[in-house]
Amino acid sequence: MASEQGALLLRRQLRDLTKNPVEGFSAGLISDNNIYEWEVLVIGTPDTIYEGGFFKAHLIFPSTYPMMPPTMKFHPPGDDKYGYEKASERWSPVHTVETILISVISMLSSPNDESPANIEAAKEWREDYPTFKKKVQRIVRRSADML
Amino acid sequence: MSHTDPMAEVDLHNLTFTETVNANLICCICHAPFVEPMASPCGHIFCESCIYQALESASQCPVDRSPLALSDLKTAVKIIHNMVNELQTYCPRVSFGCNHVGQRHMIEHHLKNDCEYTLLPCELEECGELILKKDMNSHVETCRYRMSECMMCRKKMRAFELEDHHELCPAEIVKCPHCEITNVRSDHMKHLGECPEHPIPCTLSPFGCKWIGARKNLATIHQKECAYEGIKDFLYQQKQREDALHEELNYARRGYESLNSQLEGINTQVSHMQDSLSAMFPSYFQSYRSQDMYNDDEPITDLNDVPLSPQEIIMSDNERLKNDIETITANIASLELKQNVALMTETLRMQEEMQSLRALCHGLRMQMHYVLMERRGNVGGPSTSTAGANATPGASTSTNAPTNPINGITRMRNWIGWSFILRRIMITFRLLM
Ligand SMILES: [Zn+2]
Ligand SMILES: [Zn+2]
Ligand SMILES: [Zn+2]
Ligand SMILES: [Zn+2]
Ligand SMILES: [Zn+2]
Ligand SMILES: [Zn+2]
Ligand SMILES: [Zn+2]
C-alpha cells in the first residue's frame, strides 16, 4: 500500500488542480500512464524581471513520495544556466505540487542566495544585478517566442 | 487464489465522501480524512500510518519541523475519531453501480456482507471467473462449466462439452444415407457393414477391377460380367506365391542384417585392437590402419599388394636390430684392438724416452760430480792442471781468489744453469710418471 499511497495522492492532486487551477502555473502529466512524472509551466510573476516569461519544468516524483521529495528540472528555452532548481533537504511530507510550485514562484522573485541551485547565476545576481537582469530578460523573451 | 482478493481490506484513504470534509479533519500528508488519528505534542494530527512513515524519514513534525519521536504520539481525542468515522461515504464499488451510502466505519461491513457489486469468483474451480455478487445466480445457471446431462444417453458432462456431444452421442438416432433405415448411432456402424445399398468395390479390386457399386449388386450383377472373375483362381495362386516369396525375402533380409551387425561388431573389435596396438607401437600400426581403411573400398586383388602383418613387421624389425647389434659389437672389438696397439706403441715410446732421459741424467750427474770435484780440488790445494799452470806454488791460496775472479763467476753461472736444467728434467719425469 505504501507505494500506492503516493500514486493515490498524486492522482488526487491532479484531479484537484485540473478542477481548481492555481494562479501562476499550470500542471499536468508528461505521459498519461505515469502519474509520477509531471510537466509544469510556471508563469513569470508580474512586476518582477520574470514577467511575461514561461518556464517549463519536469517534476519527477519517487515512488516513496510524499515521504521523499521529487526532483525538479527546468527547461528554459536555449539556456539552462538559470534554470535548475532541486527540491532541497528542507522537504516535508506535507508538500504537494501546489506548495512546491508556489515556493518556486516566490523563489524566482527573491532567489535564495544562501543555498542556490545555480551558483554561477547566484553570484551574478549578487555582484552584477544589471547583467543578471539582462540575461533573464533575454530568456524571458525567448520563452515567450517559443509559445 | 490468483485473482485480486475482492475481500481485501478497504483502503480508507481512498474513499469518496458525500460532502466536502471539514479541512480540520484532513491529514496534511495523505490529504484524506484521518484514519486512526494520532496527535503530536505540538498539536498536529495525522493518520497513524502517515506519521509513522514520515518519522521513518525524519524525526520531526512534518508541519512545523519541531523534533518528534514515535513515542511522543498519542491517539487523538475520541471526538476526532468519531467525526471521521461518521463521515458519510459512497461505497467504493460506486463505479460498478452500488449506490450505497453509509458511515465510513461501516463501509467495510457493507462490502463484506451487503454490497451486491463486489466481485466473487465463480464457485466452479475450472471457471473461476470474477462475477458481481448480484449476477452470481444467473451466472451459475449459464456457466459453461456447469454440470449438465445429455437428454438421450443420460451421460453427465460440462455444458460446453454438451455442445459437441450431439455429434457423437451414441443414443442419437441416425438415418442410413444409403437405404433410409434409421438406427441409434451405436448400431449404425454395424449396419454399414451389411447395408445392401452401401457402395463397395469389387472383391477383385486388388487385382485391378475398378467397379464400385451397391452391395446387393455385387453378387447378382457384377460378378457375372467382371473380367477378372475367370482368372480369379490363378490370381489368388499368384498372390499366394508372391506372399510366400515375400516372406522368404524378408527372412533372408533378416539373416543378412544379423550377419551385417555381427560383421560390424567384429570390425569394431578389430579397430579397438588396432587402437590399443598403435598406442604401443605407434609407427607401425597407424600406417597399417590407414592402408586398411583405404582398402575398405576396393577388395584386394593382388596378393603382392597385401601389406605385411604386424607380426611380420615386428619380426623383420627384430632381425634388423640383431644385425645392428652384431655390427656394433664387431666395431667395438676392433676399436678395442686399435686402442690397445696405440697404447702399447705409446708406452714403448715413453720407455725409450725415459731411458734416454735417464742416460742424460746420468751424464749430468757425472758432469756435476766432475765440477764438484774440481771445485773441491781448487779450494783444498793445487790438484788440477789448470790451477797448477796459472799459479806459483808459494802464493797459491792467497793469489788464487783475487786472480781468478772471472773464472769463479763463470763456474757459478754454469752451476746455476745446470741446476736449472736438472730441475726441468725432474719436472718432466714427474709429469711422465
Ligand atoms: Zn507539529
Ligand atoms: Zn494521512
Ligand atoms: Zn456497495
Ligand atoms: Zn462460472
Ligand atoms: Zn448423449
Ligand atoms: Zn443402410
Ligand atoms: Zn469386378
Image (cartoon, coloured by chain):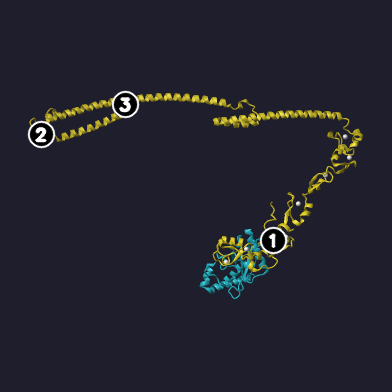
Residues packed near mark 3 inside 10 Å, few (<14), some (14 to 19) or many (20 plus): some
Q: Which residue is mark 1?
A: B106
**Where is residue B336 drawn, in percent x and y?**
40, 24
* Residue at the (25%, 27%) spot, across then down: B360
User: Is the C terminus of chain B in the top left, top right, bottom left or bottom right quadrant?
Assistant: top left
Q: Which mark is residue B350?
A: 3
Q: Secondary structure at mark 3?
A: helix
Of labels 3 and 1, earlier in sequence is 1
- Chain identity of mark 3: B
Label of residue B399 in the image: 2
Q: In the displayed structure, does residue B104 sit left or right of residue B64? A: right
Q: In the rendered image of this protein, does residue B351 appear above or below residue A143?
A: above
Q: Chain of mark 1?
A: B
**Residue B246 lies in quadrant:** top right
- Residue B162 vs residue A126, the one in the foreground: B162
Chain letter for cyan? A
Q: Amino acid at mark 3?
A: Met
Q: Residue A134: which numbered mark, if any? A: none
Q: Colour of chain B?
A: yellow
| In the depicted structure, whether residue B420 falls above or below residue B8 | above
